[in-house]
């Protein structure tokens, strides 16, 4: 098992490693088009801070990936025998790859959605949304805090028989897929593709701070989950996405980017008069307040909808 864990921590065994040249080339192409067409898609300091967050995330992920893989192996081998046995659990059949695509993506959807709807989880995730521009560098603005617990959401997969190595590979494939949707250069994909898959159009909505778009389109690869569970919003021609968060932090300091919402939670908890209020500042959606206006996304959308009807 130790050998498998060490392999999982070795970049040579991670599909993301082989995608790095594609990431760099894609940014170079986007930068060239941005320069040639004068599109102003990039802000230099913001892009550099996104890359810095990505590098920091890689360091943390190197350790946590080994811990996660070891945990998945322990669970799998307890119920199904050696994870090195290709026939153990569900095995490595082609149809298992189809199943794990849906299982992994379903898990990602709920992890991602709750990272927007539970404030303490949002505190770890918010840095990915703090850029006021959207480009391929923004995709690298990965969370530092999420890496410490994210793997817990996937614990059910080895329980039902998915091989741990297959799990890790699928999670990397999902991460690679999600890179290309962070761009403004691709307006729309074919209608059938927009119907089933996450696309740049869908993901621009996700990164927008417009009330209409807040906390929508949490998809990883498949947009079907958002359509099924009521969190889908179409990008509208009459409302351009405004990127960033509702209260932009205006800093390029990596440690402030990673920690600012945790600091804000602590301040709110300290000033809350009741213990129940303190818990709500931690576990309620961002925007809840015991003594101020309710700025939760659903509340704001409800108010906007009521105004539009009147």
Image (cartoon, rainbow, N blue to C red):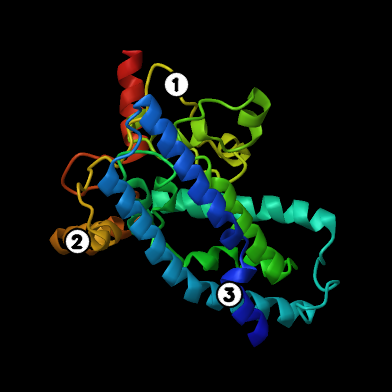
Disc 2 or disc 3, which is closer to the eye?
3
Q: CA distance from mark 2 to mark 3?
A: 48 Å
Residue 236's disc number: 1
Residue at 23%, 43% in the rendered image = 248
- Provide the secondary structure element on which disc 2 rests: loop
User: Cβ–Cβ below 8 Å for labels 2 and 1?
Assistant: no
Horizontally, residue 34 falls left or right of residue 82, namely left
Q: How many numbered marks, from 0 up?
A: 3
Q: Is residue 246 above or below residue 12?
A: above
First in residue order: circle 1 vs circle 3: 3
Task: Tell which of 159 and 294 is nearer to you.
Answer: 159
x%, y% of residue 201?
50, 30
Q: Residues within 10 Å of mark 1 (few under 14, many from 20)?
A: few
Q: CA distance from mark 1 to mark 3?
A: 43 Å
- Provide the secondary structure element on which disc 1 rests: loop
Q: Is residue 71 above or below residue 189?
A: below
Where is mark 3, residue-wise?
A: 10
x%, y% of residue 118?
38, 54
Disc 1 or disc 3, which is closer to the eye?
3
x%, y% of residue 27?
46, 44
Where is mark 2, residue-wise?
A: 274
Residue 175 appears in the figure: no
Horizontally, residue 295 falls left or right of residue 4, namely left
Q: Residues within 10 Å of mark 3 (few under 14, many from 20)?
A: some
Residue at 60%, 41% in the rendered image = 225
First in residue order: circle 2 vs circle 3: 3
User: Cβ–Cβ below 8 Å for labels 1 and 3?
Assistant: no
- Provide the secondary structure element on which disc 3 rests: loop
Q: Residue furthest top?
A: 310
In what quadrant of the picture does the C terminus appear? top left
x%, y% of residue 71?
60, 78
């Amino acid at each position: 098992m130790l050998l498998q864990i060490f392999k999982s921590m070795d970049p040579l065994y991670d599909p993301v490693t082989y995608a790095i040249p594609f990431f760099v080339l894609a940014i170079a192409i986007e930068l060239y088009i941005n320069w040639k067409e004068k599109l102003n898609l990039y802000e230099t300091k913001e892009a550099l801070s996104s890359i810095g967050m990505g590098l920091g995330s890689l360091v943390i992920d190197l350790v946590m990936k080994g811990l996660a893989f070891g945990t998945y192996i322990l669970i799998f081998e307890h119920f199904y025998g050696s994870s090195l046995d290709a026939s153990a659990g569900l095995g490595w059949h082609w149809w298992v790859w189809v199943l794990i695509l849906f299982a992994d993506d379903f898990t990602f959807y709920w992890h991602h959605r709750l990272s927007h709807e539970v404030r303490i989880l949002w505190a770890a995730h918010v840095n990915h949304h703090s850029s006021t521009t959207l480009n391929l560098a923004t995709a690298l603005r990965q969370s530092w805090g999420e890496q410490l617990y994210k793997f817990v959401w996937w614990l059910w997969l080895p329980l039902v028989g998915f091989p741990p190595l297959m799990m890790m590979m699928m999670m990397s494939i999902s991460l690679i897929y999600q890179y290309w949707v962070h761009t403004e250069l691709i307006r729309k994909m074919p209608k059938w593709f927009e119907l089933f898959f996450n696309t740049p159009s869908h993901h621009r909505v996700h990164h927008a701070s417009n009330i209409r778009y807040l906390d929508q389109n949490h998809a990883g690869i498949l947009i079907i989950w958002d359509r099924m569970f009521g969190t889908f919003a179409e990008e509208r021609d009459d409302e351009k996405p405004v990127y960033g968060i509702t209260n932009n932090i205006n800093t390029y300091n990596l440690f402030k980017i990673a920690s600012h919402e945790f600091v804000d939670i602590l301040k709110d908890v300290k000033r809350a008069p009741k213990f129940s209020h303190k818990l709500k500042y931690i576990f309620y959606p961002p925007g809840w307040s015991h003594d101020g206006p309710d700025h939760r996304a659903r509340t704001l959308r409800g108010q906007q909808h009521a105004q539009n009807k009147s």
